Image: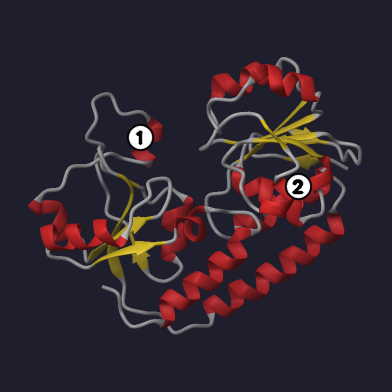
Amino acid sequence: MHFIDALGTPHQPDPAARIVSLVPSITELLCELGLAGQVVGRTGFCIHPAAQVAAIAKIGGTKDVNLEKIRKLAPTHLVVNIDENEKPTVEALAEFVPNIVVTHPVAPRDNLALARLMGGIFCADAKAAAWCAAFEEEYAALQALPKGRPATVLYCIWQDPWMSVSADTYIARMMAEIGWSVPQLEDASPGATREATRYPRFNWSDELVARIDGVLLSTEPYRFTDVHADALEKQIGKPVHVIDGEMMSWYGSRSLAGLRYLRALAQSASMF
């Protein structure tokens, strides 16, 4: 049996795999599936679950990895993500890592295929199936809620420069589950790439503020706080809230808590 990754590459099950994960949320998922003992390398941003990842060697960041450290770990599999890891880095690692598993979940229900992919390749099918069943329960509970008032919400991931997310992202599709849409933005930087159009830079303008019902400031990758929210709310005159970035952007096992987080937002008093 083969399991197909996001680039269409087939992978055979390997119960003896030695895994390096360059994706924090997938490192957490691998641990959730009972595979922590086979994860031999992880990024410094792979911080969950703390007790298990503490024993796994750090090999740099998601984009600035230490190639020699990874080479010495002799992994059989490298797990990467199209959004989080850079192609030249992955190509350099592919010269000595036999199996490159590419992931690219862009919607909440993509977590089901992701769990089955990890469980299938690394022979944790039963745990992956149990996780998928739990996901379906949480998703059904979210879908059962009465639909709230639609809102156009600007979700900010960075400042200096200000950056947001497009509709073609996991975050935006999480928001869409409770009726929130993101405004279309033209990237403000010259020569914007495809990646920039998915995570566009923008400048505050009266026209932009007029198009939105409010703003969400994410706690990651930029550490927005209530201080930022209060200042921006005074500046633009629209509701501004800090939101847990892990709950909105971490696919994999964290998505279960993410669905519960969305349900709580939907059940709370109107934010916008």
Task: Pick the quarter of the image with the C terminus.
Answer: bottom left
Q: Residue furthest right?
A: 15
* Residue at the spot of label 1: 196
Q: Residue furthest left?
A: 206
Q: Element type at marker 1? A: helix
Q: Element type at marker 2? A: helix
Q: Position of residue 9 (x, y in %)?
A: 72, 32
Task: Pick the quarter of the image with the N terminus.
Answer: top right
| Residue located 27% across and 54% down the image | 183
Q: Amino acid at mark 2?
A: Met
Work out whether 86 lies above or below 230. Answer: above
Q: Amino acid at mark 1?
A: Ala
| Residue located 65% across and 29% down the image | 59
| Residue located 59% across and 25% down the image | 65
Q: Nearer the viewer, residue 205 or 1?
A: 205
Whether residue 141 is visible = yes
* Residue at the spot of label 2: 118
Q: Residues within 10 Å of mark 1 (few under 14, many from 20)?
A: some
Q: Position of residue 26 (x, y in %)?
A: 65, 47
Which numbered disc, 2 or 1, marks the residue that appears first in the sequence? 2
| Residue located 31% across and 40% down the image | 200
Rounded to the nearest whole Å, what is the CA distance between mark 2 and mark 1? 29 Å
